[in-house]
Amino acid sequence: MRPRLSRHVGNAVAGMHGMIDEHFGIGVVEYMAAGAISIAHNSAGPKMDIVLVEEGQRTGFLAETVEEYAKAILEIVKMKETERLKMAESARKRATRFSEQQFSEDFKTAIRPVFTSALKPQS
């Protein structure tokens, strides 16, 4: 994330993402990495891969209707700071699963068998 944008998101309490059926949701991951509580649409990537429980702790909110988004906003605003910080820390931890470093490690693990078998002597 660009430094200026990162500073702004890092100062936010929450970030809202309303795209329906987004295949992934990098904006949601960026909110989480910056410590902002995410409120994302309850579909596709955010629902399936991103806004999930991390070590027994919620990492954000999923919503579909205006009422559900409003309820999530109110819950965040009314949340005790200690509770919000705990959720933000779980969200940050969850976001590391989508880091460049994690991608690189997972990619190398995935392709290692291909290269290992290619280097074995043929009988």
Image: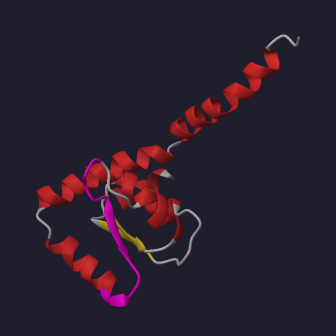
Residue at image location 11% in from the left, 64% down from the top: 80
Quadrant in the picture for residue 65: bottom left
Residue 51 vs 107, above or below: the answer is below
Residue at image location 64% in from the left, 34% down from the top: 110
Question: Residue reaching furthest front?
Answer: 123
Residue 79 vs 116, above or below: the answer is below
Residue 40 painted magenta: no
Is residue 7 visible from the viewing direction of this image? Answer: no
Question: Residue reaching furthest right?
Answer: 123
Residue 105 position within the rendered picture, expressed as x and y whole percent measured from the top left:
56, 32
The quarter of the image holding the C terminus is top right
Residue at image location 46% in from the left, 45% down from the top: 97
- Give the side of residue 91 with respect to residue 111, left or right: left
Quadrant in the picture for residue 42: bottom left
Residue 53 position within the rendered picture, expressed as x and y whole percent measured from the top left:
32, 56
Q: Which residues are magenta?
A: 55-67
- Give the side of residue 87 with respect to residue 47, left or right: left
Q: How is the image coloured?
A: secondary structure
Quadrant in the picture for residue 32: bottom left
Q: Closest to the observer: 82 or 122?
A: 122
Is residue 6 visible from the viewing direction of this image? Answer: yes
Residue 122 vs 68, above or below: the answer is above
Residue 84 position within the rendered picture, expressed as x and y whole percent measured from the top left:
19, 60
Residue 18 position within the rendered picture, expressed as x and y whole percent measured from the top left:
46, 78
